[in-house]
Amino acid sequence: MQFIKTPVKGMSDMLPADMRLREHVLSMVKSTYASFGFMQVETPMMEHIENLTSKQGGDNEKLIFKVLKRGRDLERALASDPEVLAEALADNGMRYDLTVPLARYYANNKDKLPSPFKALQIGNVWRADNPQKGRFRQFTQCDIDILGDKTNLAEIELITATATMLSQIFSEIGVSEFTIHINDREILRAAALAAGFAEDDIDAVLISLDKFDKIGFDGIRAELVGNGYDPAVVDTYLALYEQAAQGIDCASFSAKLGADALDGRVVSNITEIIECTRDMVPEGVSIVYDPTLVRGMGYYTGPIFEITLDGYNSSVAGGGRYDKMIGKFCGEDVCACGFSIGFERIIAVLKDHLPEGFGLTQEATAFLVSDKASLESKMRTFEQARALRETGAIATVLPMKKNMKNQIKLLEAEGYTVFEKIYE
Amino acid sequence: MQFIKTPVKGMSDMLPADMRLREHVLSMVKSTYASFGFMQVETPMMEHIENLTSKQGGDNEKLIFKVLKRGRDLERALASDPEVLAEALADNGMRYDLTVPLARYYANNKDKLPSPFKALQIGNVWRADNPQKGRFRQFTQCDIDILGDKTNLAEIELITATATMLSQIFSEIGVSEFTIHINDREILRAAALAAGFAEDDIDAVLISLDKFDKIGFDGIRAELVGNGYDPAVVDTYLALYEQAAQGIDCASFSAKLGADALDGRVVSNITEIIECTRDMVPEGVSIVYDPTLVRGMGYYTGPIFEITLDGYNSSVAGGGRYDKMIGKFCGEDVCACGFSIGFERIIAVLKDHLPEGFGLTQEATAFLVSDKASLESKMRTFEQARALRETGAIATVLPMKKNMKNQIKLLEAEGYTVFEKIYE
């Protein structure tokens, strides 16, 4: 029999210490969003292959773990022509994000749900990506979405709740300072048009602008000119951002684009979001208007936001408004705004900075019982363990091992501090 | 674009009320077992196809959702001979239970884990079974295992912890009476041999005895005789059980098998387990020696147990000792004893008997904000919501919908009792 001890490539076994940290973070996520009225939902981890390949998932559609058909369906599929065989073999796939399943869920259940619906979804997703440090083939996502709210109450509640939650989580490692970057797709669009780019160029131009953190303005200039755009237009475009790089408010940046470049409501909307959230977020959290924030996914339609940990050079959450996407799935316009938390990223940062033994908050006693112990003393031991549990402590009754020193060492690593030895 | 609104066949969307119940039960499961020293672990939901098809999974191996190979591996597989094509296409599969992954996990990580290791594993499993009421293709399993303890401390801790947990869960619906049935595979074996069956007949005889609840002694007799067994042997065999049906202790039943039929340690072991757990379990829980208890899975090697809810005619948890199985996976004997909780069964029983609105324990206020409200009154509203949250209540800020009556009705169903309307 061939038996493979290691997990499937790119997927992880979670040790008890891993689980303590993950459960701790999850409990903070659940309780904070619950207090803001978000309701937990769950969708099956397996989804129709048609839904997963409907062109809403971007590059993730190339990374699907497909599920083989079964029984007669499989037999029929195996008899397909060679050129369509690969396509015919799968009926389901493992979800690669939580957004496609949420769209299906909402289409399927919306009559039973309040409107707007504030959803919290936590669960595993799978991507057949090349595994590397911090990138897994099975990982946990955590999405918070408000469906059916076209007002900026949605953005304000999302940003406030997420900042509150992160502030609580990172206080464990003494980090209270992070920055929420806010921008709007409409302003990004208007800036590109104002500089002289054509409507059709906008997507490509934003792909370059999105690399600002990595390659800077010089890199963007070289890339855009290299891609054949008019150097004069590129210079005009980047000049808008270079002057803004030191911190600028949304109204001032928009004014530079010209009088008719932008609907005034876009600017007042962002200004209101920034003003309200500044008032609401915990101390240490900065809210900045960031004209260079792009957010990769093409489906955003309005405000976009991203949270970075000061000094850690990493984004721990991002999101925005995507008013057109759910409609594409369920055939009826549903405005939507959401945040996706980088759960695995947060766990990785915490793991690097938490003291050993984190999460071992309860008192823990191990009773080590020799095989010479009498029935009476075993019964007394069980009673003692019960009495400890009733005080909220952890108590375990274990056989005493020959190598008791090593047994105790491993138990100490899991938080046991009291060892009662029962010899007879 | 083809978009399918319903979940994949046999899998469920969880509504907020479903999630409240599931999370509530899970939190009781986690906290009770934690107090007994069980440590939570997680394994990937996808497993090597070799491990899933290693003949340890019984009939479940026929129900695997297999995962299609990708990239060049898939291309190579597609070029296979037709007669091996179906076999060549999958490299992974979705796990059908938590036991196979636990065996792999233990083999992979045992040096980092205490010994004995008390594991709690909660997670989804998948079976391509025919869906029917109460049977799903994706469902949650909840397994509690003690690895590396050959003594009956393992059985006693498992039974005590599980009884404590169930007692707590079912007190929500006023059910405090349930029964823990205990037997031993060795006694089942000895009884069949004592009656005159051959060693090779034991598995088949036990399959019939296992149907006692459904077909009674007459049904078993007809089945065994129908299968060609000597009617005299069958009568001798069933006489042992018929006399015992009214309640018998382990020592008395074993004595009927004859002096040398059984190692005395088997009887004293079961007697000790029953005596200790009777002392430890909460009021209302009966512990009975049940000579007809078989438990389906062939891998059990010693004590077996099952918990039934009095009056509900359904088993809500079952388990036993399986000292040979982990060794078959990891190449080294590891004694093991475990309980599997019927999580979906428990949820179904609770769902049928809980009052509507169960789990809505926090006070909840919804602020409904008209689109005519000023920025000042919105900011005041956010502040009020924050103040409520700081008292531990739920507060949500939502746009007022045109059909406010329906909006409020749906919010009331999710536990909102206070509605503040902000008109300007």
Image (cartoon, coloured by chain):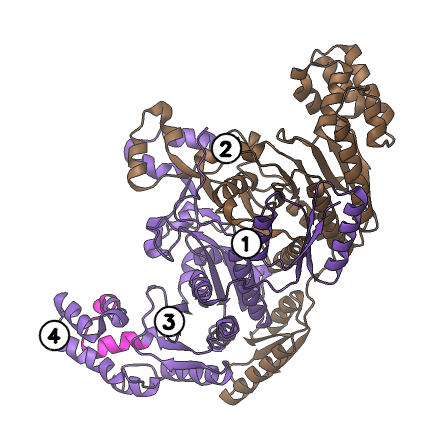
Chain colours: A purple, B brown
Assign a secondary structure to mark 1: helix
Front-most of residues A183 and B255: B255
Q: Amino acid at mark 4?
A: Pro
Q: What's the residue at 28%, 85% (across, down)?
A: A246
Residue B130: image location, x then y, percent:
57, 35
Residue A22: image location, x then y, percent:
52, 60
Assign a secondary structure to mark 3: loop
Assess whether residue A200 is covered by the magenta stretch: yes
Q: Which dot marks residue B331?
A: 2
Front-most of residues A372 and B283: A372
Q: Are marks 4 and 2 on the same chain?
A: no
Q: Amino acid at mark 1?
A: Pro
Residue B325: image location, x then y, percent:
57, 33
Assign a secondary structure to mark 2: loop
Residue annotated with mark 3? A312
Q: Which dot marks residue A77?
A: none
Q: Local crowd at mark 3 within 10 Å, few (<14), some, or many (≥20)?
A: few
Q: What's the residue at 73%, 25% (across, down)?
A: B188
Query: Viewer-nearest of labels 4 and 2?
Result: 2
Query: Viewer-nearest of labels 4 and 1?
Result: 1
Q: Amino acid at mark 3?
A: Tyr
Residue annotated with mark 4? A231
**Distance of label 2 from label 3 (alpha carbons):** 44 Å
Callout 2: chain: B
Callout 1: chain: A
Q: Is residue B174 above or below residue A39?
A: above
Dominant SS of magenta comes to helix
- Magenta residues span A187-205
**Distance of label 4 from label 1 (alpha carbons):** 57 Å
Callout 3: chain: A
Q: Are marks 4 and 3 on the same chain?
A: yes
